[in-house]
């Protein structure tokens, strides 16, 4: 096999769009190659099975050839996977996909994030309560990009969070005790931060704090780029689960 060819690579479609007359340009999230784009030749024609196979959330084993940033798809092997049948689950999956498409660097492998994505899709298929799933994936996503932080540590003081105090959030530093130039959020309750550190994303206070913090962090990583999938959550069936 040529060094420019790849076979049997685990992958998911995160976005696709028409390319020229009958083909598709497909953005992928892959296990060993990170985010990359391929051309699926003829996939946009009515006679090709590829259009039905190259669907979001579908586990795939793919092959491609090419040296540049844009590869040519050569193989598609569809695997069984969970189905996102609920509207809010589908919207949530589209949000995760767009987050990766907008922010992940090209050709930068993130195998731990790939595993977190598979876990998130499985959970979204099972539960109508999507918010804890989204928050945990957002944190895994931030970790992959080098913006990890501990819920129970104030980085500016090096001290453990105290339940009776309030704290701030700075995307560059994480949770901090004092207000500084980079602080984007204030008045975060210490007891909610400690609950999040213990893995509790279910309690009302934990939900509010984790949502506020992760929204600020994802906006910071987006650097002004919009997320179209957020508008989906204004739908009456999705409004209570806004990303």
Image (spheres, rainbow, N blue to C red):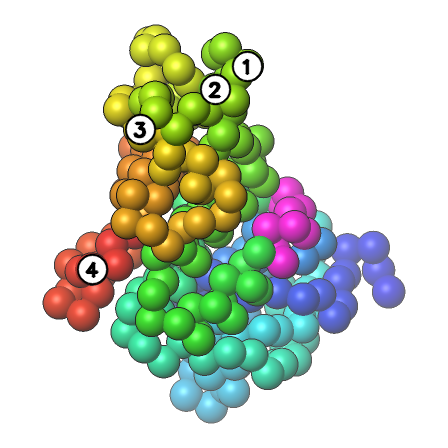
Residue 227 is marked as: none
Q: Secondary structure at mark 3?
A: strand
Q: Secondary structure at mark 1?
A: loop
Q: Please report whichever mark, 2 or 3, sits nearer to the chain's N-terminal start.
A: 2
Viewer-nearest residue: 228 or 93: 93
Q: Please report whichever mark, 2 or 4, sits nearer to the chain's N-terminal start.
A: 2
User: Would you call the spot at circle 3 few (<14 residues within 10 Å), some (14-19), or many (20 or more)?
Assistant: many
Region in magenta: 107-115
User: Would you call the spot at circle 1 few (<14 residues within 10 Å), some (14-19), or many (20 or more)?
Assistant: few
Quadrant of the image for the N terminus? bottom right
Looking at the picture, does residue 141 appear above or below residue 80?
Answer: above
The magenta stretch spans residue 109: yes
Q: Secondary structure at mark 4?
A: helix
The image shows residue 184 at horizontal and vertical percentages of 30, 22
- The residue singled out by tag 1 in the image is 158
- The residue singled out by tag 2 in the image is 154
The image shows residue 27 at horizontal and vertical percentages of 50, 58
Check if mark 2's residue and mark 1's residue have beta carbons within 8 Å.
yes
How many numbered marks are there?
4
Q: Please report whichever mark, 1 or 4, sits nearer to the chain's N-terminal start.
A: 1
Q: Please report whichever mark, 1 or 3, sits nearer to the chain's N-terminal start.
A: 1
Residue 240 is marked as: 4
């Amino acid at each position: 096999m040529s060094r420019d060819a790849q076979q049997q690579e685990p992958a998911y479609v995160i976005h696709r769009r028409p390319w020229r007359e009958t083909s598709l340009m497909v953005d992928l999230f892959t296990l060993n190659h990170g985010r990359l784009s391929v051309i699926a030749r003829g996939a946009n024609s009515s006679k090709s099975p590829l259009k039905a196979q190259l669907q979001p959330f579908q586990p795939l084993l793919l092959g491609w050839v090419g040296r540049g940033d844009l590869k040519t798809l050569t193989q598609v092997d569809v695997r069984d996977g969970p189905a996102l049948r609920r509207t809010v689950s589908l919207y949530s999956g589209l949000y995760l996909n767009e987050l990766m498409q907008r922010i992940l660097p090209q050709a930068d492998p993130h195998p731990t994030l790939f595993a977190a994505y598979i876990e998130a899709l499985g959970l979204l298929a099972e539960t109508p309560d999507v918010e804890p799933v989204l928050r945990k994936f957002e944190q895994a996503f931030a970790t992959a990009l080098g913006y990890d932080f501990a819920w129970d540590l104030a980085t500016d003081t090096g001290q453990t969070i105290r339940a009776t105090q309030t704290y701030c959030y700075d995307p560059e530093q994480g949770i901090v005790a004092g207000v500084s130039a980079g602080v984007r959020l204030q008045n975060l309750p210490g007891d909610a931060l400690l609950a999040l550190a213990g893995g509790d994303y279910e309690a009302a206070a934990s939900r509010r704090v984790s949502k506020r913090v992760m929204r600020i962090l994802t906006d910071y990583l987006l650097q002004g780029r919009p997320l179209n999938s957020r508008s989906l959550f204004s739908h009456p069936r999705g409004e209570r689960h806004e990303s």
